[in-house]
Amino acid sequence: MSARDALRVSNDVVLALVVVTALCFDFTNGFHDTGNAMATSIATHALGPRTAVALSGVLNLIGAFLSLAVAATIASGLVDTKVVTLTVVAAGLAGGIIWNLLTWLLGIPSSSSHALIGGVIGSTLAASGGHAVLWKGLVSKVIIPACLSPIIAALVAAVGTYMLYRISRSLTEKARNHGFRIGQIGSACMVSLAHGTNDAQKTMGVITLALIVNKSVPSTSNAPFWVILSCALAISLGTYLGGWRVIRTLGKGLVEIEAPQGMAAESASAAVILLSSGFGYSLSTTHVATGSIIGTGLGKRGAEVRWNVAGRMATAWLFTLPSAALVGAGAYALAHVIGGTIGVVVDLIILAAVAALIYVRSRASKVDHNNVNAEWTGGGAPTEQPEPAKAA
Amino acid sequence: MSWINLQAIWKIVVFGLVLGAGLPSLFAVGLFSLSKGPRQTATEGGDSDVVVGGNPLGILAAALCFLIILAAIAWGIYEVYKIGHPAAK
């Protein structure tokens, strides 16, 4: 085998590793975000917890095929694609996955898109310096939408909530809740669909970027079919497993939700997400869903928004981009120092070890479909555990 | 490229209110019409969770509301598909 062939083979190994890592990210994206679509339906008992996550998984799968608009634009507008290498992509993904897992452990619904973007920007910075990052694109396409989208969603949800209670005020509470619970099934499905059209696309974009970098496909190529299919499957499998910790925070932590509020929040989320992708605005489904839920607390007289929980989330949002960037940069530096295929492999082994550690840690205070709706007592996981949580 | 795309934000707010708050309001109107009728279990206090009141006109109006919502959703999904697959115009 000539040296050139050896290089080619080693590149293909790295490419395969990057694709697998990207699918792992997509998987964490799915289970981190199940709550965006289904938390309010689970909280109001419109859907059983397991039915909800299964339905959401299927709709994410369909949504992933429904629109391919976001996939083409995700990476190209943020970093200079000419300087991106497979190692940069792998390190960026590592940053995104670690941040997603950490916030899941804490039950904080942070943005998976920001985790991914932050990771890739961090590794690009480490690889080629500040000139390789398109800062203006970052501000206008990521940071400004992140500030505006929760406010718009909250406004729509608050107006919707006010209208729903006003129109249905002659109904008894039981009849009203019954009716809106049925409506909620429809609105929750729309959010899941919208999530598939948005978030599955982001991983497709990253894998396509890796294929372009490796010259496996021409630089103008769209996502190949196997990429679309595998991303759709990864995100829907992740969704099906359900990020119960995040579901709990969104459904029980922010606002105590009744069925009309749930429907208003979901409709607002679905409309804002779908419209934004339609108008070419990429945004985080997490920010929109959280904004909607806060809005629904503002729109109902007497409802209380737990601003301390909201504040904790907002803090996590501020840290998402820089933290994921820091991990991404560190991962790149490590892979670069070791060099070549081995560097990437070492990165991914460390990533797997950290993931396993976080998983083990999460078992100490388990949240699943059995206790997801338990009374909110301040922390993420319910305190009335059958067995005492192990000390850290 | 400007920093803030005001054109898009303005549209997202207006269409967001029409679709994201308007459609569920229409659903509420449907429930309200559905509750009208001789069997006023849904409006007369009571402990029942039955919404249907039994007035044929009310049921018809409700069906109309729900149909408009379904049509709007179908149209929305079609639009998303059209934008996402430019070749399928």
Image (cartoon, rainbow, N blue to C red):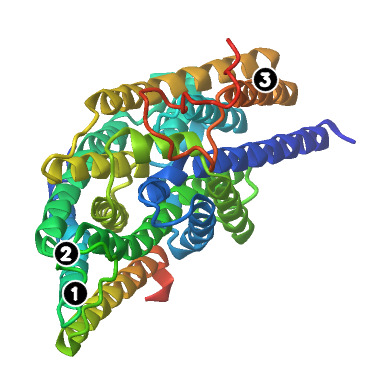
Who is closer to the viewer here, B81 or A107?
A107
- Is label 3 or label 2 in front? 2
- Labels 2 and 1 share a subunit: no
The residue that mark 3 highlights is: A350
- Is label 3 or label 1 in front? 1
What subunit carries mark 3? A
Q: Secondary structure at mark 2?
A: loop
Left or right for A297, reference A227 = left
Who is closer to the viewer here, A208 or A360?
A360
Q: CA distance from mark 3 to mark 1?
A: 60 Å
Asked if the residues shown at circle 2 and circle 1 are in contact, with their CB atoms under 8 angstroms apart, the answer is yes
Name the quadrant containing residue A316. top left
Query: Residue A186 in the image: x percent, y percent?
Result: 36, 64
* Residue depicted at x 22% and y 46%: A153
Query: Residue A29 in the image: x percent, y percent?
Result: 50, 41
The residue that mark 2 highlights is: A171
- Which amino acid type is marked by label 3? Ile
Task: Look at the image and tell me in which quarter the N terminus of chain A lies.
Answer: top right
Q: Secondary structure at mark 1?
A: helix
The residue that mark 1 highlights is: B35
* Residue depicted at x 35% and y 23%: A378
Left or right for A134, reference A26 = left
- Which amino acid type is marked by label 1? Ser
* Residue depicted at x 28% and y 78%: B71
Who is closer to the viewer here, A278 or B47?
B47
- Labels 3 and 1 share a subunit: no
* Residue depicted at x 51% and y 45%: A30
Q: Is residue A148 visible?
A: yes
Neighbor class of circle 3 (other Cα within 10 Å; few <14, some 14-19, many 20+) is few
Query: Residue A175 in the image: x percent, y percent?
Result: 25, 64
Q: Secondary structure at mark 3?
A: helix
- Which amino acid type is marked by label 2? Leu
